[in-house]
Structures are given as structure tokens and as C-alpha cells.
């Protein structure tokens, strides 16, 4: 018997999370993994280049739901995915991360009723599993926090990356049987592509030296949608670039806002700041491997730098990934204290770092084992 398993991907950080699982499931005779791309990220360099880098085939289905308000994105994904669910009747739906489609597909899949599945008459809807469950920033002004809470409260299986995830879910009343700690799937992608990443010399293309520059990424609405915050951040980057060069691949949300706020020339005219288009996975990771430090508000980069032992300064008041602070190299900063924090770390070094349990490149294998036991294979 083959089990149809939908892997939902919508936005850039999702592609690195579904890729290891897709490849692992493809090797199993009992599994028929299908990639469903909802379309939230649609630019070639936000989506297609990731599929190429990660060795993913064209999505089996593309819903074509692009930008829009949160309700528009979520509503349209639910409507489109509900039809797909009824037509294809998957046995399992796997959602990853915390983007709008993660929540929308979870709602659609947990509320669906199949009209009758001949192979599995007792199964009236797919099993819904969330990979990267249990993360909490406790900041409900973040759209991702709402997506996490809704997804985790509905999903049948909750695969967590770290002990804090288990703890949060248990505190929210999730039963222990639903929770399984599997580790961090992003590290699987990194380790699988390590030799390719290391073979690139992206930083040299920009005439940078190894460990001689800072890597900046910023796209959180709290940092880039507020003109005052964005202006202050730009002036801070200009100041920091006088000490050490900055490489800044600019996310579309940030680019739009820099342009509409008239801030683009301020950054473009600085000799120490290199503004790049969004980079492919392997190119971006090469820039990460060789940077002196990262300054970011991304969730994934907090994890990757912690794993690699590279100092990371996160421009946010909180993180849903606290293990990157307690065991990794991450520090939460404000616009006001970033420069001092950087100087502290460069002078005194990062406090002792401990490897994070199950961040080892074998998460996809553990997820496959979990799916096997779920289908009693
Ligand atoms: C989304 C996720 C966020 C994730 C981030 C990674 C939610 C709530 N947010 O935020 O968790 O960290 O992706 O990148 O799901 N745009 C383009 N081209 C694209 C994609 C987007 O021009 O390929 C534009 C959109 O039209 C929109 C803006 O960029 O104007 C923001 O995109 P959106 O998908 O709303 O959210 P992100 O900020 O990317």
C-alpha cells in the first residue's frame, strides 16, 4: 500500500524544511510524497532557485496564491487547498514552519471530510503533522506567532526541534502522545549541501575577505514596515559599515519599503554596504559560512549561525528559538544597543557554546520513522 503525503511549501524558509523530507520519503516504497506550493513566494530568486539548489522537482501542484493581506492569503489558500484535498485525498499532510499557508492548510486539512476513501474507509481526513512545532515567541503582534498557535492546536502530530517546544505544547494542554522531538530539519539541508556550499566563493565575488564582513538580513514587519524604525536601522547600518563591510541581500518586503520611504539612496551610496538581490540557498549559506557575524531578524539564520558557531545579533525583542541563546551564539539586540553588543562580543568572544541535541542532519530520518509508526508500517 502507498500513502500519499502532501508536503506544503509556501515561502522561502519552507523550501529548506521540506527538501530533506521529500528526498527521504522518495526512497521509501510505501510513500508517495507530493509537493504542494501555495505560491506565497513567487519571484524566481525567492522560490525557483531554492527548488534547483535543493534538488526538488517542480511542485506537483501550484496553488498560485501570491501576496495579499493576511486574511486574503490565508482565505485563498484554504479555498484552493480544500479543493485539492477533496480531489486527491492524501493520507497525510505535513506543514512546516510558521507562515500563513502553514496555518491555512492545517485548518483546511483538519476540517475536511472525505466522501469515502476506498483504500482506507475508516480514514475520513488526512493525518496532519507539523514540523517545527512548539516554538513560541509569546509575542502575539507577530503574525507567525498566531500561525504557530493555531497550527499546533489543530495538528495531530507535533514534531519539535528542541525541548522548549515540547514544554510549550504540554503547557498548552497538548497530550504527550502527539509530541515527538525530532530535531532541526534545516540542519539536514545544510549538511546535505555542505560540499556544494563550501565549493562556492561567493564572498570573493564581492571582493570580501574570509571573516571580514557582516551579513545582514531584515524583513520582519516590526523592523521594516515602520518608517521610523527602518530609517533608524539604515542610519545604524551606515555607521557600522564604516568599521567593517556589510553584505545585505534585500528581501522584497524590505526593498519595497526602502524605496517607498526614500531610504534606498542612503544605503546604496555607502561604499561599505553591498546591497544584493535575494540569494539562492547555497550562495547565501556560503556568505554565512564566511561572515564575521550576522545581524538579522530571521528565524532560520539564528539557528544556522548557532549551529556554525558564528555570532548572531538578532534585532528583535524576543525569539521563538531560545535555545540559540542558551546554547548557541545568538543575542537579542535593539537599535540602541546593537553597536555596544557587537563590540562586547568582538572583544570578549561569545560565551561557551554547547551543541544542540538532535541538530545533527538526521531529522528527516527520524520524521520518516515517526510516519512509519503512524501508518503502522
Ligand atoms: C513571509 C513569512 C515570514 C517568513 C518570510 C521569509 C508570513 C506571515 N510571513 O514573510 O514568516 O519569515 O516570509 O521570507 O507568512 N513578495 C515579492 N516576491 C516574492 C514574495 C513576496 O515581491 O517572491 C512581496 C509580497 O508581494 C509582499 C512582500 O514581498 O508585498 C512580503 O511578502 P509576504 O509573503 O507577505 O511576507 P514576507 O514578509 O515574505
Image (tube, rainbow, N blue to C red):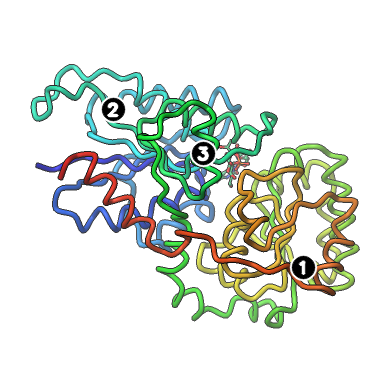
Q: Is mark 1 within 8 Å of ligand 1?
A: no
Q: Mark 3 points at which residue?
A: 134
From the viewer's perspective, is residue 73 above or below residue 276?
above
From the viewer's perspective, is residue 374 above or below residue 22?
above
Foreground label between 3 and 2: 3
Query: Residue 211: horizontal and vertical position, in percent?
Result: 70, 78
| Alpha carbons under labels 2 and 1: distance apart | 45 Å
Residue sitting at x 26%, y 41%: 5
Sequence-wise, which precedes: disc 3 or disc 2? Answer: 2
In which image quadrant can residue 7 be found?
top left
From the viewer's perspective, is residue 132 above or below residue 150?
below
- Label 1: few (<14), some (14–19) or many (≥20) C-alpha neighbours in 10 Å: many
In which image quadrant can residue 253 be found?
top right
Name the residue nearer the viewer: 119 or 368.
368
From the viewer's perspective, is residue 227 above or below residue 342?
above
Name the residue nearer the viewer: 83 or 133.
133
Name the residue nearer the viewer: 231 or 318.
318
Query: Residue 267: horizontal and vertical position, in percent?
Result: 83, 59
Task: Left or right? Give the position of 149 relative to 116.
Answer: right
Q: Mark 1 points at which residue?
A: 246
Q: Is mark 1 on a helix, strand or loop?
A: strand
Task: Left or right? Give the position of 185 relative to 230.
Answer: left
Q: Mark 2 points at which residue?
A: 85
Amino acid at each position: 500500500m502507498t500513502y500519499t503525503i502532501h508536503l506544503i511549501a509556501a515561502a522561502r524558509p519552507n523550501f529548506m524544511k521540506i527538501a530533506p523530507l521529500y528526498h527521504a520519503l522518495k526512497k521509501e516504497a510505501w510513500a508517495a510524497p507530493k509537493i504542494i506550493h501555495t505560491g506565497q513566494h513567487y519571484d524566481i530568486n525567492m522560490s525557483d532557485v531554492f527548488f534547483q539548489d535543493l534538488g526538488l522537482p517542480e511542485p506537483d501542484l501550484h496553488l498560485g496564491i501570491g501576496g495579499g493581506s493576511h486574511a486574503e492569503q490565508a482565505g485563498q489558500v484554504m479555498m484552493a487547498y480544500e479543493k485539492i484535498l477533496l480531489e486527491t485525498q492524501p493520507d497525510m499532510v505535513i506543514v512546516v514552519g510558521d507562515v500563513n499557508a502553514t496555518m491555512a492548510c492545517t485548518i483546511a486539512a483538519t476540517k475536511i471530510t472525505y466522501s469515502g476513501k476506498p483504500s482506507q474507509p475508516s480514514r475520513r481526513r488526512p493525518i496532519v503533522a507539523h514540523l517545527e512545532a512548539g516554538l513560541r515567541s509569546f509575542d502575539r503582534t507577530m503574525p507567525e506567532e498566531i500561525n504557530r498557535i493555531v497550527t499546533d492546536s489543530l495538528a495531530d502530530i507535533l514534531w519539535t526541534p528542541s525541548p522548549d517546544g515540547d514544554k510549550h505544547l504540554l503547557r498548552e494542554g497538548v497530550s504527550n502522545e502527539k509530541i515527538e522531538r525530532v530535531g532541526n530539519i534545516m540542519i539536514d539541508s545544510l549538511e546535505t549541501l555542505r560540499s556544494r556550499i563550501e565549493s562556492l566563493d561567493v564572498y570573493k565575488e564581492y571582493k570580501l575577505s574570509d571573516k571580514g564582513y557582516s551579513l545582514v538580513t531584515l524583513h520582519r514587519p516590526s523592523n521594516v514596515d515602520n518608517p521610523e524604525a527602518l530609517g533608524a536601522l539604515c542610519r545604524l547600518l551606515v555607521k557600522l559599515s564604516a568599521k567593517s563591510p556589510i553584505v545585505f541581500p534585500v528581501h522584497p518586503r524590505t526593498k519595497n519599503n526602502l524605496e517607498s520611504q526614500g531610504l534606498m539612496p542612503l544605503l546604496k551610496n555607502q561604499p561599505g554596504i553591498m546591497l544584493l538581490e535575494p540569494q539562492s540557498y547555497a550562495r547565501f549559506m556560503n556568505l554565512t559560512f564566511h561572515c564575521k557575524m550576522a545581524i538579522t531578524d530571521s528565524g532560520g539564520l539564528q539557528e544556522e549561525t548557532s549551529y556554525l558557531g558564528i555570532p548572531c545579533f538578532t534585532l528583535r525583542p524576543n525569539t521563538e528559538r531560545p535555545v540559540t541563546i542558551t546554547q548557541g551564539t545568538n543575542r537579542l539586540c535593539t537599535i540602541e544597543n546593537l553597536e555596544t553588543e557587537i563590540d562586547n562580543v568582538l572583544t570578549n568572544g561569545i560565551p561557551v557554546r554547547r551543541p544542540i541535541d538532535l541538530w545533527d542532519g538526521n531529522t528527516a530520518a527520524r520524521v520518516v520513522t515517526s510516519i512509519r509508526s503512524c501508518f503502522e508500517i
